[in-house]
Image (spheres, coloured by chain):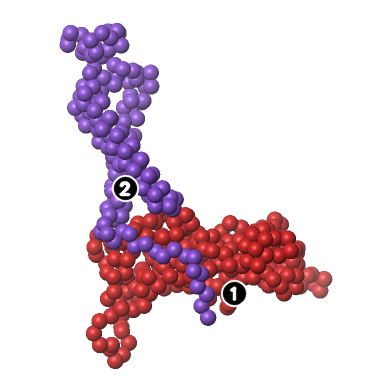
Chain colours: A purple, B red
Amino acid sequence: MTAQSPTRPPRVPSGRTRHNAEKWSWVFMRVTGPVLLVLILTHLFINLMTGDGISQIDFAFVAGKWASPLWQVWDLVMLVLALLHGGNGMRLLVNDYAQRPWLRKVLHGALGVAVIGIIVLGSLVIFTFDACPVDADPSLLPSFCEDVR
Amino acid sequence: MTATAESPAVGEVKAMQVTLRILRTNPEGTADHKPGESYWQEFQVEAHATDRVLDALHKIKWEQDGSLAFRRSCAHGVCGSDAMRINARNRLACKTLLKDLNPAKPIIVEPIKGLPVEKDLIVDMEPFFASYREIMPFLVTTGNAPARERLQSPEDRQRFDDTTKCILCAACTTSCPVFWTDGQYFGPQAIVGAHRFIFDSRDEGQWDRLEILNDKAGVWKCRTAFNCTEACPRGIEVTKAISEVKKVLTTGEI
């Protein structure tokens, strides 16, 4: 005798259409995790532990850092990887908890907009950053601004 | 140093009062509860510290309340029928001694989570077995069957020895947080079942099974929470087996 409950939804083998998609998502998380660990811990160490510590962080400090291409690239990589890594993690959570298809679509859409939006805005700030605004108080600006004027 | 006649009998185990708090569900309802409603009920039984939870459940069913429903077949940890959530951990009732559970406090017994409850501690195992069937848990070969056994070296046998111990009790799958929230996930047991054949040198269906596990509902859903390894009453290193399958899928080599 077999008891079959008729209410059970059938399994949806949806991953087949995008071959290996979930595999690459997993590999991406495994690779970017350690990379982010190094990027973020170094970032925190440089900003908080070296020099005057937390009290050194002001407009001039950030401007001084972004004057160097190394820190521009560093912060860009950190920004992109952190958002993709975090966004992918959120995508997996949505897949786990959002059962209704329309809700999934809405949450995935909102997630995509947020991730892309923040990456675009963040990289715009990094590369179009003006370290020496014209009508600013000179005491707040980095030291190299005097030569620029 | 000789034993005196007054000394208590060697190894005598004292009887004690144990309280069991059982999460009950009756699909037909009772006088106090609606059909399908879950409620807690406490039972007091006299038991020995060396008794198992299953013995206590038997005492309740046989002496106090015959309507209590639970599965058990062999009652010795081999058939895998009586997996249940005891004090918030998935275990086999027939392998859990009362003395290992702090009998001074009520022992909490619930059905395993993530599968539909049918009555009291009995759940519908069909979704669990459906996942197991999907990974093709049988030997797949090509060509004519040999006239004698298919031989294998001890080293080849050793590769999948751990996962042959599975008794399909569902303790691992129903301890998995991903399985609780996502009904699509195959669950740890199906991956253990696939591992047993994927790493078997005599089997030829490995890549069919790997293809199934590469699905959205497959091994990539695993977050290495290790709940399954902790829950397995047979001591199978479930998370390790899942990681070995992931490794084959990423490297392409078995």
The label shown at residue A29 is 2
> For the residue carrying disc 1, how many other residues have a C-alpha within 10 Å: few (<14), some (14-19), or many (20+)?
some
Q: Type of residue at label 2?
A: Met
Q: Chain of mark 2?
A: A
Question: Which quadrant, please, contains the C terminus of chain B?
Answer: bottom left
Residue B168 in the image: x percent, y percent? 48, 71
View extreme (bottom): residue: B147
Would you place residue B32 above or below residue A68 in this image?
A: below
Name above or below for residue B153 compared with residue B126: below
Q: Is residue B147 visible?
A: yes
Q: As shown in the figure, which amino acid type bears the numbered disc 1? A: Arg
Q: Position of residue A56 (x, y in %)?
A: 34, 18
- Label 1's element? loop
Residue B232 seen: no
- CA gap between label 1 and label 2 equals 42 Å
**Chain for disc number 1:** B
Compared to B237, does A35 lie above or below? above
- x, y (%) of residue B136? 36, 74
On screen, residue B15 versus residue B164, left or right, reads: right
Most extreme residue toward the right is: B6
How many labels were placed on the picture? 2
Quarter of the image where the N terminus of chain B is located: bottom right
Residue tagged by mark 1? B72
What residue is drawn where x is 44% and y is 63%? A9
In this rendering, position of residue B35 left or right of residue B175: right
Q: Position of residue A106 (x, y in %)?
A: 37, 44
